[in-house]
Each structure stands twice: as structure tokens, then as C-alpha cells.
């Protein structure tokens, strides 16, 4: 539940779209007019909820990410390296270790 009611939201919108445009510190002035809230609370309310330039619809997010594949499982790096090394004919560290151990015998 929000600590802001509809009346307070309307006051913030009206001030920020009108008189607040020409004030250097509009949130401080607004906090004097609405004493129940700090300037930081009013700033966050405007910037993250009420600003009409915000695009709060989730449909655009869904459309933007609809073509992105979702990775269900990712191969682990230790299994990728030996597979890659065997493809390009470079011995893995295990093979090198076993060769050096055999040459010492």
C-alpha cells in the first residue's frame, strides 16, 4: 500500500507540470506545501511513478524481449575447455600431466 493518496498525487502532478518547471529546487518547495512528505519522498514519487514521460507499460518490455532466447542450462566451463581443446588438437592439462608422469617413469 502506498503512503501517497490520490489527492497528494494530483497535487504533485499539478505542481511539477506547472509552477515547478521554473523553480530551481521544486521538491523542496513542494515539501513545504505538502508537509507530510520529505523532498526526497516527493522527488522519488515524481521520478518513478508520476512523471508522464515515464513509460510504465509492461507490453513494451514484453515485446522488446520476446525475441531474446532464454538459456535453460548453460554448459559449465570445465566441460567446454576439454571439448574445445580436442577439436583443435591441443592436449588438455590432464593429458599433459599424464605424459609428463609417463616420461618420468
Image: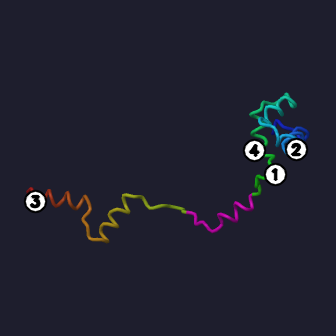
Q: Earlier in the sequence, mark 2 or mark 1?
A: 2
Give the number of the disc on residue 103. 3
The picture places residue 12, in percent across and down from the top left corner, at: 85, 40
Provide the secondary structure element on which disc 4 rests.
Answer: helix
> Is 59 inside the magenta-drawn segment?
yes
Report x, y in % for residue 78: 36, 58
What's the residue at 85%, 46% (across, down)?
17
Q: Report the Cα–Cα distance between label 2 and label 3.
A: 84 Å
Query: Which residue in the structure is indicated by mark 4?
Result: 47
Residue beneath label 2, please? 18
Left or right of 32 in this view: 81? left
Residue position marked by numbered label 1 in the rendering: 52
The reply to whether callout 3 and callout 1 are in contact (CB within 8 Å) is no
* Separation of residues labelled 4 and 2 (CA atoms): 16 Å
The secondary structure type at the circle numbered 3 is helix
Among numbered discs 4 and 2, the one appearing first in the sequence: 2
* Viewer-closest of 17 and 8: 17
Alpha carbon separation for disc pair 3 and 1? 74 Å
Q: Magenta residues, as a range?
A: 58-70
Amino acid at each position: 500500500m502506498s503512503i501517497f493518496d490520490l489527492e497528494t498525487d494530483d497535487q504533485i502532478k499539478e505542481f511539477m507540470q506547472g509552477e515547478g518547471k521554473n523553480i530551481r529546487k521544486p521538491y523542496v518547495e513542494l515539501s513545504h506545501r505538502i508537509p507530510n512528505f520529505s523532498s526526497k519522498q516527493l522527488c522519488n514519487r515524481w521520478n518513478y511513478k508520476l512523471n508522464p514521460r515515464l513509460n510504465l507499460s509492461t507490453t513494451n518490455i514484453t515485446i522488446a524481449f520476446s525475441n531474446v532466447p532464454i538459456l535453460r542450462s548453460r554448459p559449465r566451463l570445465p566441460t567446454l575447455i576439454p571439448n574445445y581443446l580436442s577439436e583443435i588438437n591441443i592436449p588438455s592439462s590432464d593429458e599433459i600431466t599424464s605424459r609428463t608422469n609417463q616420461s618420468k617413469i
